Image (tube, rainbow, N blue to C red):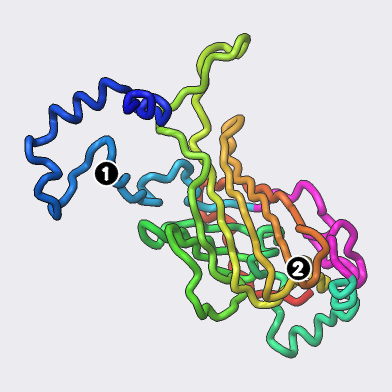
């Protein structure tokens, strides 16, 4: 009967003999003592160091490559011009009231530079590690600073801000050196994908998805995926952004932004936010 139970839960029957022989004669008889690691009590895996175990090196300087939505990104769109953005009735009403002069006067000229929109702004990025668990992203457009916190949770009473609070994690990890199986006609084994960065941002101040007043509110969540690869000698950073806002949108707004890596800080030109 015991052998049948062991087989059903996936433990080899022979393992029972090994464990029994390895145990001290009086093991379990005394009670109260610490139980060491074993097949039934495996040791906890070591905590990952986000910096030293990074599957992608995202540090350095990057510049936006605008390949789509040119007229919404390179210039300020006209008022009431918001095709492709799933605004609900209330969101359209707010967008129709956009007044850049009013934003300037109230000190809200950075509304289109918050976490939900900053990766769509034509900009340069400077990415560095603050420490082993915080990755910092600076933009020269609007002079914004984002911090991605690994192994963290948003503080209970976080004050809303343009960049909010971002929780980061490496996803899709495989052991270094992992090789995908050989595929017929592929020319041999190929290195496996080592992972990508996922970032969830909350605690945002109300802002704009585009400069012409398309709103997102305090309930908005920004989900981002950062991936990088090198092709023809050029290293690319692809940022896929999913903005979900039950207050002003009927569905999520999804974009993909491209950046090209630079050798140095050439062209880095910090400029303040502009309402228009």
Badge 2 is on which residue? 246
Vertical arrangement, residue 195 with respect to residue 148, above or below = above
Could you tell me which residue is drawn at 69 percent across and 68 percent down?
220
Vertical arrangement, residue 204 with respect to residue 185, above or below = below
Q: Is residue 155 visible?
A: yes
* The N terminus, quarter of image: top left
* The C terminus, quarter of image: bottom right
Could you tell me which residue is drawn at 77 percent across and 46 percent down?
67
Q: Position of residue 60 (x, y in %)?
A: 49, 51
Q: Is residue 199 left or right of residue 242?
A: left
Badge 1 is on which residue? 43
Q: Position of residue 125 (x, y in %)?
A: 57, 57
| SS at badge 1 | loop
Q: Position of residue 69 (x, y in %)?
A: 82, 53
Going from N to C along the chain, the mark reached first, 2 or 1, is: 1
**Dot 2 and dot 1 residues touching (CB under 8 Å):** no
For residue 67: magenta? Answer: yes
**Between 232 and 225, which is closer to the camera in this rendering?**
225
**Between 107 and 36, which is closer to the camera in this rendering?**
36
**Between 70 and 97, which is closer to the camera in this rendering?**
97
Q: Is residue 110 visible?
A: no
Range shown magenta: 64-88
Instruction: Name the main secondary structure of what is drawn in magenta.
Output: loop
| SS at badge 2 | loop
Of all residues, the one furthest to the front in this rendering is 1
Of all residues, the one furthest to the bottom in this rendering is 105
* Label 2 Cα crowd, 10 Å radius (few <14 / some 14-19 / many 20+): some
The total number of labels drawn is: 2
């Amino acid at each position: 009967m015991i052998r049948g139970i062991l087989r059903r839960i996936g433990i080899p029957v022979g393992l029972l003999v090994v464990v029994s022989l390895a145990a001290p004669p009086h093991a379990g008889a005394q009670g109260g003592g610490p139980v060491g690691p074993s097949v039934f009590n495996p040791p906890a895996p070591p905590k990952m160091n986000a910096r030293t175990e990074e599957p992608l090196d995202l540090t350095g300087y990057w510049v936006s490559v605008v390949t789509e939505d040119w007229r919404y990104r390179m210039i300020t769109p006209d008022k009431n011009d918001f095709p492709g953005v799933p605004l609900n009735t209330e969101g359209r009403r707010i967008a129709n009231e956009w007044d850049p002069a009013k934003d300037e006067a109230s000190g809200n000229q950075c509304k289109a530079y918050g976490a939900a929109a900053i990766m769509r702004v034509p900009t340069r990025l400077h990415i560095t590690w603050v420490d082993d668990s915080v990755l910092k992203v600076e933009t020269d457009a609007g002079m914004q600073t984002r911090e991605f916190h690994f192994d963290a949770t948003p503080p209970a009473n976080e004050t809303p801000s343009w960049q909010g609070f971002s929780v980061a994690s490496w996803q899709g990890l495989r052991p270094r050196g992992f090789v995908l199986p050989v595929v017929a006609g592929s020319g041999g084994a190929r290195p496996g994908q080592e992972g990508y960065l996922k970032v969830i941002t909350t605690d945002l101040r109300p802002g704009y998805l585009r400069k012409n007043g398309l709103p997102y509110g305090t309930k908005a969540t920004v989900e981002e995926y950062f991936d990088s690869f090198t092709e023809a000698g050029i290293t690319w950073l692809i940022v896929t952004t999913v903005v979900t806002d039950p207050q002003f949108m009927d569905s999520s707004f999804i974009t993909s932004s491209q950046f090209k890596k630079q050798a140095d800080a050439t062209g880095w030109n910090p400029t303040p936010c502009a309402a228009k």
